[in-house]
Image (cartoon, rainbow, N blue to C red):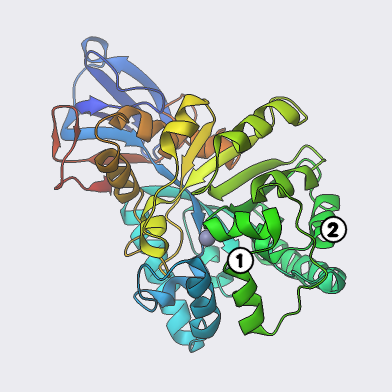
Amino acid sequence: MYRKLTATHVFNGHRILEGDPVLITDNTGRIIELVDAGTAGDDIECLTGLLTPGFINAHCHLELSHMKNAIQPQTGLVEFVQQVIQKRESPEERKQECMRLAEEEMYRNGIVAVGDICNTADSLIVKQNSSLHWHNFIEITGFIGSVADKRIEQATQLQSRFREVLPGQPVTLSPHAPYSVSSRLFQGINDRTAGQLVTIHNQESIAENALYLDKTGDFLSLYNNLGIDISSFQPTGRSSFQSWVPHFTQEQSIISVHNTFTSPEDIFHCKSNLQPSPFNINFCLCPNANLYIENTLPPLDLLRENDVSIILGTDSFASNHQLDILEEIRIILNQTGGSVKLEEALQWATLNGAKALRFDDRLGSFEKGKTPGIVLIDSIENGTITDRSRARRVL
Ligand SMILES: [Zn+2]
């Protein structure tokens, strides 16, 4: 049983196609081929809007889904982090229900795969019953060198649990952020992730650079408030990005998340100094979360001029009102005054994300044999989205 689908516009993972393309799939959504309407025969379903492969949400924290509206917007990152620590506890039943609803919301909004940050085993049940693809990142924190071995041991145990319960889902260790991981802990993570995919929250606030440049800025008060003595931390005199990247020496692929305060010098450093060349780093943008927490946006022009790999994420309900990649695209298109076109943002949301999460053998584009999910964006005008546009799953 085949399905033949076409729409006003068809984006195939690379570009919005000219002509009258028809997508032929089997009834599981596996792509048979993409042909011209002239050779597609009868029974073509014509939809109004734009067809795209399913979206990749490269950065989420499913286990924080119960924190929707719990934290006031625009407090700045240091206050945000403290509030997450204070408010993340909740009855088990509520947490499970909120995660279930969040997973359903992502499915409905056309998301087919998620790079998900895990500090706990809370999300195992929802993921066991999910039709989305998941890459689980076991997140590790510890800014004091002496706790590194213990934190690695705990994270490795959690990783084994994920492997046991979710044998089909990749799971790798990852550092939380430069301001919460000691050199020794970075070293331990590097030792255990050769050739693997890791992720890190990078330069989400200006304070992170200040910490590494000369040990000043708001993170000093965070550690003071948490009662953590960071007197042994030595600033490197370089930006945060230039300080953590060299910790990864084993051909890892890296998803660097946020990058709100990444500078031209950081990108230059990344492109010119690192091995293997080209260094495999993907810049994941979560613009709605950046607006929510810091009321700022990442340097899109800088990243685009340097032709780095850009991908998109929603972050969690702690810092976003919805888990919807189309809303991330909308912010980008609205805030860049037309310099980013829908086609480019869709590339970030589909094939780039699939490659970064290593799911591009089955997701990200309408290529023969893939089952990428088929999503329709409605209310398209003049080739782009409008305020009324929504994404929904067709297959
Ligand atoms: Zn995050």
Which residue is the site of mark 1? 118
Q: Residue at x 45, y 64 (%)?
A: 316
Marks 2, 1: nearer the viewer: 2
Residue 288 position (above or below residue 29): below
Q: Residue at x 53, y 56 (%)?
A: 206
User: In terms of depth relative to the viewer, which is nearer, 179 or 187?
Assistant: 179
- Could you give the CA–CA distance between mark 2 and mark 1, rounded to whole angstroms? 18 Å
* Residue 183: image location, x then y, percent: 81, 58
User: In terms of depth relative to the viewer, which is nearer, 217 or 136?
Assistant: 217
Tell me: 51 left or right of 230: left
Residue 69 position (above or below residue 383): below
Q: Residue at x 25, y 14 (%)?
A: 18
Query: Which kind of residue does numbered mark 2 sit on?
Result: Gly
Please rate how many residues cluster around mark 1, counting C-alpha atoms within 10 Å: few if below 14, some from 14 to 19, many from 20.
Answer: many
Q: Quadrant for residue 295, please give it.
A: bottom left
Give the total of numbered labels.
Answer: 2
Helix, strand or loop at mark 2:
helix
User: In terms of depth relative to the viewer, which is nearer, 281 or 209?
Assistant: 209
